[in-house]
Amino acid sequence: MSLQNATRDKLKTVSTATLCTALFKRGLRNQFIQDVHPLNPQRGNMVGEAFTLRYIPAREDLNPITVFLDRSHPQRVAVEQCPAGAVMVFDSRKNARAASAGSILVTRLMKRGVVGVVTDGGFRDSPEIAAMDIHAYHNRPSAPTNLTLHQAMDINVPIGCGDVAVFPGDVMVGDGEGVVVIPAAIADEVALEAVEMTAFEDFVTEKVQEGRSILGLYPPTDEQSRIDFEAWRKRHNR
């Protein structure tokens, strides 16, 4: 199931906080990737389908620097296979002591139209990546090459990233706070509900800024709050 353009557009307008609440309503409690932060929090929302790469702990006899001479090396192949519009997600076992990738690989992904990179480890060359036209999320900067700790194994398989299961094709949404994973099968309905929730939250924020109590407003247990919201929607074309 591919991500619809209309759904992608909706998800660009909502926060990961709102999406987490919409997912919680559906019984999904653990969809926010833990301890992963944006390199550039000022960028707009990242939205794309997950394309994954799984690392295992490196074994020294199988992971010397010469493995990069092999054109079939999984890390290099994954970079060349990740589709335009996708988000490349690295399973680095929450280990940021060595980089998941660096600026050259991320530049290649950017030039191929990939919209974002996410790892529960770290990126090297992180200042350069932060300035690129691509969304990037990681635990913290990490200068050592991935080979010192990580051995690339499997391309586009189910992985764990920051204690969250990520399946190929899941919809990844990132904002200034972090990244949430939306199962592909419910992405359309979650996006629609999140847009509705955002409209209501904007209305509530406006009223609270005017000095109104949250009691009866948030949630709207008073009938007048619901009436006021409908009037607000008409005025703001929401």
Image (cartoon, helix red, strand yellow):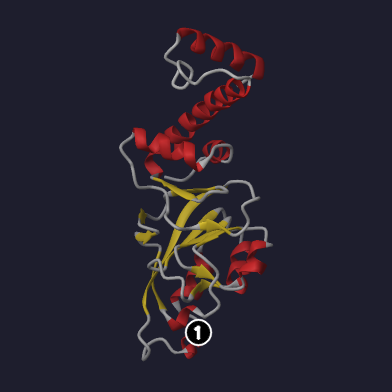
Q: Quadrant of the C terminus?
A: top right
| Location of residue 4 in the rendering, given as x and y in whole percent from the top left corner | 51, 40
Label 1, on which residue? 68
- Kindly tell me whether residue 72 is visible in this rendering: no
Q: Nearer the viewer, residue 7 or 43?
A: 43
Q: Can you tell which quarter of the image residue 24 is in?
A: top left
Q: Residue at x 45, y 59 (%)?
A: 51
| Location of residue 202 in the rendering, given as x and y in whole percent from the top left corner | 58, 26
| Location of residue 169 in the rendering, given as x and y in whole percent from the top left corner | 42, 51
Q: Residue at x 41, y 36 (%)?
A: 21
Q: Can you tell which quarter of the image residue 92 is in?
A: bottom left
82 relative position to 170: left or right: right
Q: Quadrant of the N terminus?
A: top left
- Kindly tell me whether residue 24 is visible in this rendering: yes
- How many discs mark residues in the rendered view? 1
Tag 1, which secondary structure?
helix
| Location of residue 212 in the rendering, given as x and y in whole percent from the top left corner | 56, 17
Mark 1: amino acid: Phe
**In the rendered image, the vertical position of residue 213 relative to residue 106, given as above or below:** above
